[in-house]
Image (cartoon, grey):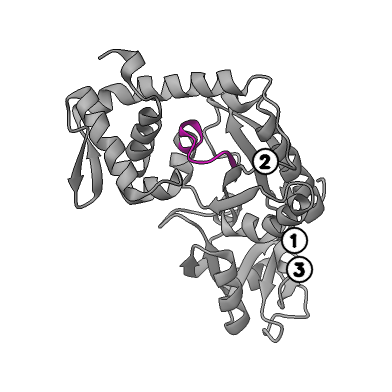
Amino acid sequence: MRLEKVDLNLFVVFDAIYRQRSVTKVAVLLNLTQPAVSNALSRLRQTFDDPLFIRTPNGMAPTPVADSVVGDVRAALVLLDKSVSVNARFAPALSEKVFHLGMNDLAESLLLPLLHAAIKTTAPKIALTSYYVAREAATEDLKSGGIDLLIDTPGVNAKELSHQSLGRLPYVVAMRPDHPLAGQRLTVEDYLAGEHIHVSSRRKGRGQMDVALHALGYRRGVAMRVQNYLVAARITAETDLLWTVPKVLAEQLPLHTAELPFDVEPLMWNLYWTKSAQNDPASQWMREIISTAVVEAIGSS
C-alpha cells in the first residue's frame, strides 16, 4: 500500500465508524450520504485487505485489524488537524463551522439561549449541536472529535485534556407552591422526613446530597430517580416530592424554594477541550463565548 495512492479522507471515515459503530450515524456526523460512507468503507477494506467492521445486532463491530490500527489513525488525524490549525485564520462572521458541545439538559436550558443570542449577530452561519455525553466516554469523544467542548463536573478524567473552571451553582430545595412545607423554615428533620426526587444520568449510585448527608450520619428517602432536570421540575410541581436543585434553575421555575438545612458544596462546572485544540482559533473563540454565557447565566462565583 503506497500512501500517495490512499485518500486520506478515508481515515476520517474509519475513525468515525469506529466511534459510532453505524454507517447511518457517520453519514449524519460527516454530512455525507449513506452510500458515500458505504463506498468509503469498501475502499478502506480494499486498502487494508480486511473487513475492518462486521455488522452485528449491536452495530458495526471492529475486527482485530481495525483495533490494531485505530490508535495510529487517530494520532495521525490529530497531528494533521494540528498542522492545518496552526496560525489558521478564523473569521466568525464568515465561518460555517458546526460546534459539537457535550452537556446535560441543565446546562442546555441555561446556556443555549445565551449562546444562540451571542453568535446570531456576529457569526450567523455558525451552528451548534448539543447532546449528553457519558462521563466515562467524554475523554475519548473529545480526543476523537466527536465533540469539540464539554461542560461537566470536575469528575471528568482531565489528565489528557485542558480545562477551566466555569462557575459554582449553589443548591436550594424546591417544592410545589402549595406544598405543606412551603412558607416555613425547612429543618433537617423536615428534609429527612420528606420523599425526594433525584436527577442523575446514572442508573444507580449516590448523589451529591446523599454523600453530604452520609457524612452527617443521615440518609434521605429517594422515591424517584430521573435523568432530566426539566422532567424533575414537572414532577415536583405535581407531587409532594422535594427536589434539591441548583438555585439558578429553581428560580426560573414556578416552584417554591427553601434554603438547604445543611451544608453542601455547590455544583461545579468545568469546560474541557483537547490539548491539541488549545491554540485553535475557533476553539478559543467558542470557549470565550461559553465563558461569557456562563457568567451571564450563573454569575462569576
Which SS class for mark 1?
helix
Whether residue 104 is visible here, answered yes or no, is yes
Residue nearest the observer in this picture, 105 or 286 = 286
Could you classify mark 2 by the number of other residues whose Cα lies within 10 Å: few (under 14), some (14-19), or many (20 or more)?
Answer: some
Q: Amino acid at mark 2?
A: Ser
- The residue beneath circle 3 is 251
**Residue 296 placed where, x, y %?**
81, 52
Which SS class for mark 2?
loop
Residue that appears at 17% across and 28% down: 50
Check if residue 143 falls in the magenta segment. yes
**Where is residue 21, by image quadrant?**
top left
In the picture, the disc for residue 95 is 2
Check if residue 209 falls in the magenta segment. no
In the picture, measured across the screen, residue 120 lies left or right of residue 198, that is right
Range of residues picked out in magenta: 141-150
Q: Is residue 198 above or below residue 154?
A: below
In the picture, the disc for residue 99 is none
Residue that appears at 51% across and 52% down: 132
**Where is residue 85, by image quadrant?**
top right
Residue nearest the observer in this picture, 162 or 264 = 162
- The residue beneath circle 1 is 248
Residue nearest the observer in this picture, 301 or 149 = 149
Marks 3, 2: nearer the viewer: 2
Could you classify mark 1 by the number of other residues whose Cα lies within 10 Å: few (under 14), some (14-19), or many (20 or more)?
Answer: some
**Residue 99 placed where, x, y %?**
60, 44
